[in-house]
Amino acid sequence: MAAGVSDRLWENGDIVALIKAKEARLLKRNIPMRISIARGDIVDVDLRGAEGVEKNNDMTSNGRPCVIVLNNAGNKVSPMTIVAPLTDKRQFKGLPIQVEVSASELQFSGSKDSVVECGHLRTIDRDLRIRARLGTLDLTAMERVDKALAISIGLG
């Protein structure tokens, strides 16, 4: 099976050309350029298009805060990232793939006690879905997220 153009660019190490092509498409569609993100950042994400029990946008903000869980090397070069959505603390069911976090651990204005849903991971187009960077998850909370992620994907 023949590789697509983006696959060939990736295999040839020409990631710069891939990123420039993506930026040109975004400019044509009046989409803002890439927001700088790192693992553990909390971002406001447009999760429209969710089906069934998948996490969707919050009804008041039309977005949902999510924690970036992709490694930093991937976040530097990939047009995609992986996020774990946050939800209200009342949704906590004591599952090992859920992480309770306090408002102070979320470290962004207007935050409230929440749950990181490590069983609802989403791979998203960072340029089309991330609307803003809100803050960074506290390091001790991120360690709890790492444990829940390992359980969620069968590594722990």
Image: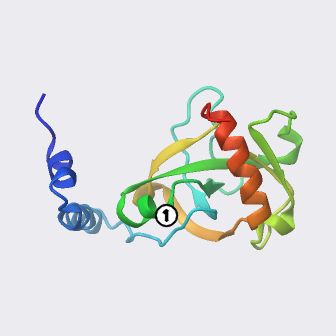
Residue 87 relative to residue 78: left or right: right
Q: Position of residue 133 (x, y in %)?
A: 59, 70
Look at the picture and state if 75 lies above or below 81: below
Q: Residue furthest left?
A: 2
Q: How many marks?
A: 1
**Left or right, 50 with reference to 17:** right
Task: From this view, report whether residue 36 is shown above or below residue 42.
Answer: below
Q: Nearer the viewer, residue 144 or 118?
A: 144
User: In terms of image quadrants, where is residue 54?
Assistant: top right
Work out which quarter of the rendered image holds the C terminus and state it: top right
- What residue occupies the far front of the structure in this picture? 156
Q: Residue at x 16, y 41 (%)?
A: 4
Three-letter residue code for mark 1: Asn
The residue depicted at 48 percent of the width and 73 percent of the height is: 36
Q: Which residue is mark 1?
A: 72
Residue ID at (79%, 35%): 96
| Residue 59 makes an appearance in the image | no
Q: Is residue 56 left or right of residue 116?
A: left
Q: Which is nearer the eye, 46 or 38?
A: 38
Image quarter of the N terminus: top left
Residue 3 placement (x, y as % from top left): 15, 38
Residue 67 position within the rendered picture, expressed as x and y whole percent measured from the top left:
64, 56
Side of 112 where 65 appears, left or right: left
- Secondary structure of the residue carrying numbered label 1: helix
Q: Give the class, few, some or many, for how many residues have Cα within 10 Å of label 1's Cα (few <14, many ≥20).
A: some
